[in-house]
Protein backbone atom coordinates (compact mmCIF):
# COMPACT_ATOMS: atom_id res chain seq x y z
CA UNK A 1 0.00 0.00 0.00
CA UNK A 2 1.05 3.58 -0.54
CA UNK A 3 1.29 5.75 2.56
CA UNK A 4 1.46 9.55 2.50
CA UNK A 5 2.96 11.36 5.48
CA UNK A 6 1.49 14.84 5.23
CA UNK A 7 3.10 18.00 6.54
CA UNK A 8 5.78 17.50 9.17
CA UNK A 9 4.90 13.81 9.61
CA UNK A 10 7.54 13.02 6.99
CA UNK A 11 10.14 13.96 9.62
CA UNK A 12 9.29 10.70 11.42
CA UNK A 13 10.54 8.71 8.41
CA UNK A 14 14.29 8.03 8.55
CA UNK A 15 14.64 9.16 4.93
CA UNK A 16 12.21 12.11 5.35
CA UNK A 17 9.97 10.73 2.58
CA UNK A 18 6.45 12.05 2.18
CA UNK A 19 5.40 8.85 0.34
CA UNK A 20 6.25 5.40 1.68
CA UNK A 21 5.52 2.05 0.04
CA UNK A 22 4.34 -0.27 2.84
CA UNK A 23 5.31 -3.86 1.97
CA UNK A 24 3.12 -5.76 4.45
CA UNK A 25 0.46 -7.79 2.66
CA UNK A 26 -1.72 -8.33 5.74
CA UNK A 27 -4.54 -5.92 6.62
CA UNK A 28 -3.91 -3.85 9.74
CA UNK A 29 -5.59 -0.99 11.54
CA UNK A 30 -4.57 2.53 10.64
CA UNK A 31 -3.54 2.96 14.27
CA UNK A 32 -1.26 -0.08 13.97
CA UNK A 33 0.18 1.23 10.72
CA UNK A 34 0.87 4.62 12.32
CA UNK A 35 2.62 2.91 15.24
CA UNK A 36 4.78 0.81 12.90
CA UNK A 37 5.71 3.96 10.99
CA UNK A 38 6.68 5.66 14.27
CA UNK A 39 4.00 8.34 14.04
CA UNK A 40 2.89 9.70 17.43
CA UNK A 41 -0.90 9.41 17.80
CA UNK A 42 -1.10 12.99 19.07
CA UNK A 43 0.41 14.25 15.81
CA UNK A 44 -2.32 12.73 13.62
CA UNK A 45 -5.31 15.02 13.09
CA UNK A 46 -7.01 12.93 10.43
CA UNK A 47 -6.42 10.04 8.07
CA UNK A 48 -7.85 9.12 4.69
CA UNK A 49 -7.99 5.80 2.89
CA UNK A 50 -8.48 5.97 -0.86
CA UNK A 51 -9.31 9.68 -0.48
CA UNK A 52 -12.08 9.09 2.09
CA UNK A 53 -11.87 10.08 5.74
CA UNK A 54 -11.26 7.11 7.99
CA UNK A 55 -10.94 6.33 11.70
CA UNK A 56 -7.71 5.04 13.21
CA UNK A 57 -9.48 1.78 14.07
CA UNK A 58 -10.41 1.16 10.40
CA UNK A 59 -8.45 -1.43 8.43
CA UNK A 60 -5.96 -0.68 5.69
CA UNK A 61 -5.54 -3.38 3.09
CA UNK A 62 -2.96 -4.12 0.41
CA UNK A 63 -3.46 -1.80 -2.54
CA UNK A 64 -4.96 1.00 -0.43
CA UNK A 65 -3.70 4.56 -0.51
CA UNK A 66 -3.42 5.81 3.08
CA UNK A 67 -2.78 9.45 3.97
CA UNK A 68 -1.93 10.72 7.45
CA UNK A 69 -2.21 14.44 8.18
CA UNK A 70 -1.08 16.48 11.22
CA UNK A 71 -3.07 19.34 12.77
CA UNK A 72 -2.92 22.39 10.54
CA UNK A 73 -3.16 26.05 11.36
CA UNK A 74 -3.74 29.08 9.31
CA UNK A 75 -5.90 32.05 8.93
Image (tube, rainbow, N blue to C red):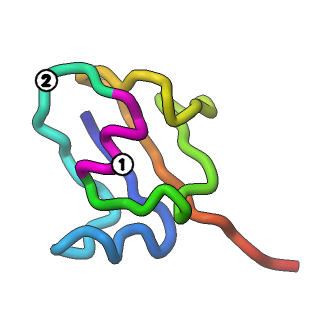
Q: Which mark is residue 34?
A: 1
What range of the chain is rendered magenta?
29-36
Is 44 on the left-hand or right-hand side of 62? right
Q: Where is residue 40 shown, x and y percent of the image?
A: 42, 62
Q: Residue at x 51, y 36 (%)?
A: 56
Q: Which residue: 38% across, 34% down?
A: 65
| Residue 20 in picture, x, y percent from top left | 24, 53
Which quadrant holds residue 26?
top left
Identify the residue at horizontal 37%, vertical 60% (top origin). 39
- Please report contact status of discs 1 and 2: CB closer than 8 Å, yes or no: no
Q: State which quadrant residue 38 falls in.
A: bottom left
> Which secondary structure type mostly characterizes the magenta part of the structure?
helix
Q: Residues within 10 Å of mark 1 (few under 14, many from 20)?
A: some
Crowdedness near tag 2: few (<14), some (14–19) or many (≥20) residues, C-alpha within 10 Å = few
Total marks placed: 2
Q: Is residue 14 left or right of residue 17?
A: left
Q: Is residue 1 above or below residue 11?
A: above
Q: Is residue 29 above or below residue 36?
A: above
Magenta segment includes 32 = yes
Q: Earlier in the sequence, mark 1 or mark 2?
A: 2
Residue under the image location 34 percent in, 76 percent down: 11
Amino acid sequence: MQVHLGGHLSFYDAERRSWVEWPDAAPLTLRGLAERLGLPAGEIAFVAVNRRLAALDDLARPGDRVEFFPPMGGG
